[in-house]
Image (tube, rainbow, N blue to C red):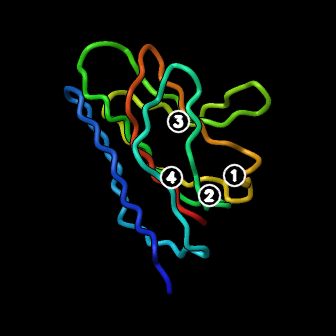
């Protein structure tokens, strides 16, 4: 089979008299191994490890902060630990969504993807596909 994964993306900004946009058409990607993991997790202010199940080499990932509260500065940091240091690669404000391609040469066993809620615990939805 081919084109098992479809990624669509657009970014539009309008602020007063200034606007900018980038619209990418849908991209179809071949998946070499049938695997995916995801769900909804409660992300605490401590480290929350994301379960990747049978995904051995990550391909694409999508993360969504389910917090819709209009007050506060709570956000989620997503990254991986190297030793005791969290290396953040994404930040999600309330209702934010982030879709990105992960480095498939870094195996999940070596790098554990984690999320940390800042200011309060929040719920996050995620999906990680195999390369």
Mark 4 lies on residue: 61
Q: Is residue 67 above or below residue 130?
A: above
Q: Are marks 1 and 2 in contact (CB under 8 Å)?
A: yes
Q: Which residue in the structure is indicated by mark 2? A: 58
Ranked by sequence position, the earlier of labels 2 and 3 is: 2
Residue 18, relative to residue 129: is it above or below? Answer: above
Marks 2 and 4 close (CB-CB < 8 Å): yes
**What residue lies at 33% left-to-right and 28% top-to-bottom?**
94
Residue at the spot x=70%, y=33% of the render?
81
Q: Is residue 129 left or right of residue 94?
A: right
Is disc 2 in contact with disc 3, using a CB cutoff of under 8 Å?
no
Tell me, for residue 90, which label it has, or none: 3
Work out which residue is located at the far bottom of the displayed protein and give it.
1
Residue 82 left/right relative to 64: right
User: For the residue carrying disc 3, how many other residues have a C-alpha within 10 Å: few (<14), some (14-19), or many (20+)?
Assistant: some
Residue shown at 46% from the left, 29% from the top: 43
* Residue on which disc 1 sits: 108
- The percent coordinates of residue 131 (x first, y second) are 60, 66
Where is residue 70, by image quadrant?
top left
The tag earlier along the polypeptide, 4 or 1, is 4
> Given this view, does label 3 or label 1 mark the residue nearer the observer?
1
Circle 4 sits in a helix, a strand or a loop, which is it? strand
| Label 2 – label 3 distance at C-alpha | 16 Å
């Amino acid at each position: 089979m081919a084109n098992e994964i479809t990624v669509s993306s657009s970014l539009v900004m309008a602020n007063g008299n200034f606007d900018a946009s980038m619209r990418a058409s849908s991209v179809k990607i071949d998946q070499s191994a049938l695997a995916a993991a995801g769900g909804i997790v409660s992300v605490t202010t401590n480290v929350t490890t994301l379960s990747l199940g049978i995904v051995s080499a990550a391909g694409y990932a999508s993360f969504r902060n389910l917090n819709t509260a209009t007050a506060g500065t709570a956000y989620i940091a997503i990254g991986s630990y190297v030793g005791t240091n969290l290396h953040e690669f994404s930040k999600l404000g309330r209702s934010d969504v982030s879709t990105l391609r992960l480095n498939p040469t870094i195996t999940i066993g070596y790098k554990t993807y984690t999320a940390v809620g800042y200011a309060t615990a929040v719920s996050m939805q995620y999906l990680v596909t195999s390369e």
